[in-house]
Image (cartoon, rainbow, N blue to C red):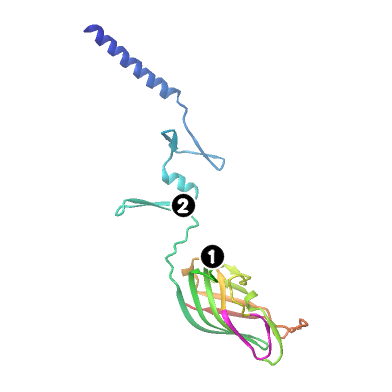
Amino acid sequence: MKKKFLFSGFTALLVFLSFSLGALAAPKLSVWFNGKAKKVSVKMINKKAYVPLNDVVSWFGGKVKYDKKSNKYIVTSKDYHPSGTKVKSYNVNAVLQSGPMKMTVSKVTVNPSYKYDQYMPAIKAVVLDVKVQNTSTKKVNWFPVQGIYAFNTGEQIEDAIVYSQQVDGEFLGNTTKSGKIALKVSKSNLDAIKSIQILVDGPSDDEFNQLGEKVTYNLKFR
């Protein structure tokens, strides 16, 4: 009986020493992010490294929020923009006129998922419903779609051709084109856009003779 007790004690001592030596011999794991060492605890589970969620998300500029009611963690990246903004339209009456050409903006629509057609992806956009008229009897060229559109947020669009309808170009005498000018929003929060500063070059004839001056307009719609 005494021998069994001594053997059991010796076995336990060996197991304890094995674990102790293994712990001492195990290298301390470290994490490097973009060339810099990070102070974070690392755990190996089934040969996979695990680090705290909050730490990893913060390295990418994101945020972690815990929702007690649903018992879930909500992770958002720094460039995430919620799609909670609904489509909103505002009736306006803005008139830009240069020489014989006149553009009337009747409505501004803020749309988080505007689609030009079925083949193009949806975009965040501010869309202008416009009517462009040549009030003269002569042929005139005018390109309001290629004008400069600057939001009050500081974002500027200098070419709205891709997602806009063809409401500019050549105009025969006493003709009108109606449609939409869609301004793709890349950086701004749609809810923060309240006005648009518009700058359009003057119209010209086929010999590039100017028929009007540059026109500017500050369109406030909400």
Reply yes or no: does residue 153 show up in magenta: no
Relative image position of residue 205 (x, y in whole percent): 74, 84
How far is the residue under mark 1 from the one under mark 2?
A: 26 Å
Q: Which residue is drawn at 57% across and 67% down?
A: 155
Q: In this view, does 136 lie above or below 18?
A: below
Judged from the image, the secondary structure of the residue bearing numbered disc 1 is loop
Identify the mark nearer the N-term, 1 or 2: 2
Q: Which residue lies furthest to the bottom in this view?
A: 137
Q: Residue at x 38, y 22 (%)?
A: 19
Figure disc tally: 2
Circle 2 sits on which residue?
62
Reply yes or no: does residue 178 show up in magenta: yes
Q: Is residue 91 above or below residue 185?
A: below
The magenta stretch spans which residues? Answer: 168-179
Relative image position of residue 195 (x, y in whole percent): 52, 75
Q: Is residue 29 above or below residue 99?
A: above
- Which mark, residue 121? 1
As rendered, which of 222 and 136 lies closer to the eye? Answer: 136
Neighbour class for label 2 at 10 Å: few (<14), some, many (≥20)? some
Q: Mark 2: which amino acid? A: Gly
Direction from residue 47 to residue 202 in the image, left or right = right
Q: Residue at x 52, y 72 (%)?
A: 126
